[in-house]
Image (cartoon, rainbow, N blue to C red):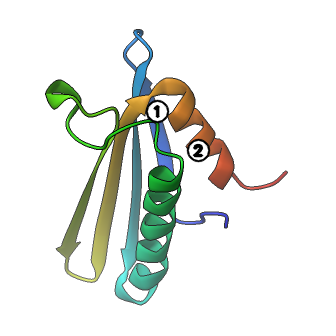
């Protein structure tokens, strides 16, 4: 599955851990498509888990945070993933559009 709405912005801490914030802002009719993309990304993350999920400072190897904010006709969905750099880059590559 390719993602069409979520746009990933990576950030590397320089020590092998990264964060990937994916965001989409859509009108209500497109929200189900965005949420399907969020579910697909989270399913891939779980299936290819590099270790236990949870806050990194509490022993987790990776974690995810999902936020949904409605403002009038628009809804913004933000999905933030943290974990090992190679794992996150593999996730982004998996969902990248084919050239």
Q: Nearer the viewer, residue 4 or 41?
A: 41
Please provide percent x and percent y for residue 6: 49, 59
State the residue at coordinates (60%, 63%): 3
Please provide percent x and percent y for residue 48: 53, 47
Please provide percent x and percent y for residue 85: 49, 25
Residue 6 in view of the camera: no
Q: Which residue is mark 2?
A: 92
Residue 33 located left or right of residue 64: right
Secondary element at tag 2: helix
Q: Nearer the viewer, residue 25 or 42?
A: 42
- Alpha carbon separation for disc pair 1 and 2: 9 Å
Verify CB contact (< 8 Å) between mark 1 and mark 2: yes
In the figure, 50 relative to 18: above or below?
Answer: below
Residue 76 located left or right of residue 48: left
Q: Which mark is residue 76?
A: none
In the figure, 70 relative to 54: above or below?
Answer: below
Secondary element at tag 1: strand
In the figure, 57 relative to 33: above or below?
Answer: above
Quarter of the N terminus within the rendering? bottom right
Please provide percent x and percent y for residue 94: 66, 50
Res 90 → quadrant: top right
State the residue at coordinates (48%, 62%): 43
Q: Which mark is residue 10?
A: 1
């Amino acid at each position: 599955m390719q993602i069409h709405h979520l746009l990933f912005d990576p950030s590397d801490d320089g020590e092998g851990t990264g964060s990937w914030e994916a965001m989409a802002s859509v009108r209500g009719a497109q929200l189900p498509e965005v949420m399907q993309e969020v579910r697909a990304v989270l399913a891939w993350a779980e299936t290819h888990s590099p270790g236990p999920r949870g806050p990194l400072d509490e022993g987790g190897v990776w974690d995810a945070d999902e936020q949904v904010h409605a403002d009038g006709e628009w809804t913004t969905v933000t999905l933030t993933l943290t974990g090992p750099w190679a794992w996150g880059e593999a996730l982004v590559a998996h969902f990248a559009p084919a050239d």
